[in-house]
Amino acid sequence: MFNRLMTAAAAVVLTAPWAVAGPIDSACVRSERGARNSQVCGCIQQVADQTLSRSDQRRAARFFRDADEAQKVRMSKSDADNAFWARYKSFAAAAEAYCAR
């Protein structure tokens, strides 16, 4: 009984990150570039899970659909937008370094 429970728990832990697509992964796969390489999209989502809140992930996912949105946030004078942009830049640098391998 204990062995079955441990096996089931291990299966959940090992498959969970790939079984549920996050907002970044979903937006990336739907994008023109992402459709060609879903593994990279999954990698980017993993970095997002480690560096961005779920709210920030949803906001960043919009950039895949509307690049102008990213430009508006980057140029904004709002403190909240500037703080988000700093977090987004850190995420993007980490994703580029980690997922480019």
Image (spheres, grey):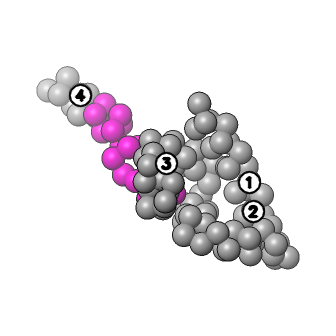
Q: Could you say which quadrant of the image residue 17 lies in?
A: top left
Magenta span of residues: 9-26
Q: Label 4 amino acid?
A: Thr
Question: Circles 3 and 2: CB distance less than 8 Å?
Answer: no
**Residue 23 shows in the view:** no
Mark 3 = which residue? 41
Q: At 57% from the left edge and 50% from the top edge, which residue is drawn?
A: 48
Q: Name the chief secondary structure element in magenta.
A: helix
Mark 2 = which residue? 85
| Mark earlier in primary sequence (1, 3) | 3
Question: Circles 2 and 1: CB distance less than 8 Å?
Answer: yes
Q: At 56% from the left edge and 64% from the top edge, which residue is drawn?
A: 64
Q: At 43% from the left edge and 61% from the top edge, which residue is drawn?
A: 30
Query: Seen in the image, is 51 located left or right of residue 16?
Result: right
Q: Residue furthest left?
A: 1
Question: Circles 4 and 1: CB distance less than 8 Å?
Answer: no
Secondary element at tag 3: helix
Q: Disc 3 vs disc 2: which is toward the camera?
A: 3
Mark 4 = which residue? 7
Judge by depth and name the residue closer to the eye, 63 or 37.
Answer: 37
Mark 1 = which residue? 89
Separation of residues labelled 3 and 2 (CA atoms): 20 Å
Q: At 71% from the left edge and 45% from the top edge, which residue is drawn?
A: 93
Q: Disc 4 vs disc 2: which is toward the camera?
A: 2
